[in-house]
């Protein structure tokens, strides 16, 4: 089941962080870059990020989450995370589909590490177009995607 997460609730923020860290640790290993900002997030940072969070729950366990900022035209996805124990169950797809169907926007935007092949392939498979690349530093580059709806 997918439901809104009240990130202002400390326990909810703690739950999100408990899946975010292991999820981004997998990405860090894939791209061989361990200084990803989401790995340094805290409960306080999550509560102040001004993103809307939705979670996928299996019974009462939070297995995955998506966060975004949206206006009347664009949904900008900031996180799409799944705990590694729940990889390959279609949770990321369910969360992405949920956001696309829930928000009446014209465009969805997202960015990921350019070396994160599973994420890059996921967005391409879902009809996102590569818009641009951005070199953060010598070891990290990002790809920005958009999907017109």
Image (cartoon, rainbow, N blue to C red):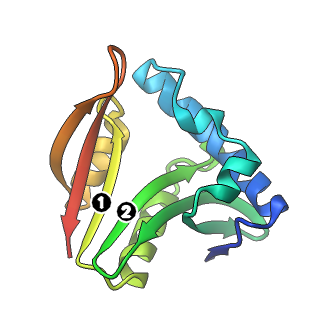
Q: Residue at point 65% right, 40% down?
A: 41
Q: Secondary structure at mark 1?
A: strand
Residue 125 in the image, given as x and y percentages of width and height: 24, 55
Question: How far apart are the two marked residues, 1 and 2, measured between alpha carbons?
Answer: 5 Å
Outermost residue on the top side: it is 138
The answer to whether mark 1 and mark 2 are in CB contact below 8 A is yes
Q: Which residue is mark 2?
A: 76
With 16 as the anchor, is 133 left or right in this view?
left
Q: Which residue is mark 1?
A: 109
Quarter of the rendering occupied by the N terminus: bottom right
Q: Position of residue 20 (x, y in %)?
A: 63, 45
Q: Quadrant of residue 70?
A: bottom left
> Which residue is found at the position 43% from the left and 74% from the top?
99
Q: Nearer the viewer, residue 108 or 96?
A: 108
* Whether residue 4 is situated above or below residue 139 in the rendered picture: below
- Residue 37: horizontal and vertical position, in percent? 54, 34
Which quarter of the figure is the C terminus placed in?
A: bottom left
Check residue 61 in the rendering and tell me which mark sits there, or answer none.
none
Of 103 and 64, the residue lying toward us:
103
Q: Earlier in the sequence, mark 1 or mark 2?
A: 2
Q: Secondary structure at mark 2?
A: strand
The answer to whether 75 appears left or right of 80 in the picture is left
Residue 23 position within the rendered picture, expressed as x and y whole percent measured from the top left: 58, 40
């Amino acid at each position: 089941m997918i439901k809104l997460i009240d990130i202002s609730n400390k326990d909810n923020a703690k739950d999100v962080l408990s899946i975010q860290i292991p999820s981004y640790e997998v990405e860090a290993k894939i791209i061989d870059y361990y200084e990803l900002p989401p790995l340094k997030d805290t409960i306080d940072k999550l509560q102040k990020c001004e993103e809307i969070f939705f979670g996928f729950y299996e019974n009462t366990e939070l297995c995955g989450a998506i966060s975004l900022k949206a206006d009347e035209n664009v949904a900008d996805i900031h996180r799409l995370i799944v705990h590694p124990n729940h990889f390959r169950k279609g949770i990321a797809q369910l969360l992405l589909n949920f956001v696309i169907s829930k928000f009446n926007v014209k465009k969805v935007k997202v960015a990921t590490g350019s070396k994160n092949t599973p994420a890059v392939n996921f967005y391409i498979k879902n009809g996102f177009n590569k818009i641009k690349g951005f070199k953060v530093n010598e070891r990290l580059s990002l790809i920005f995607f958009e999907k017109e709806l």
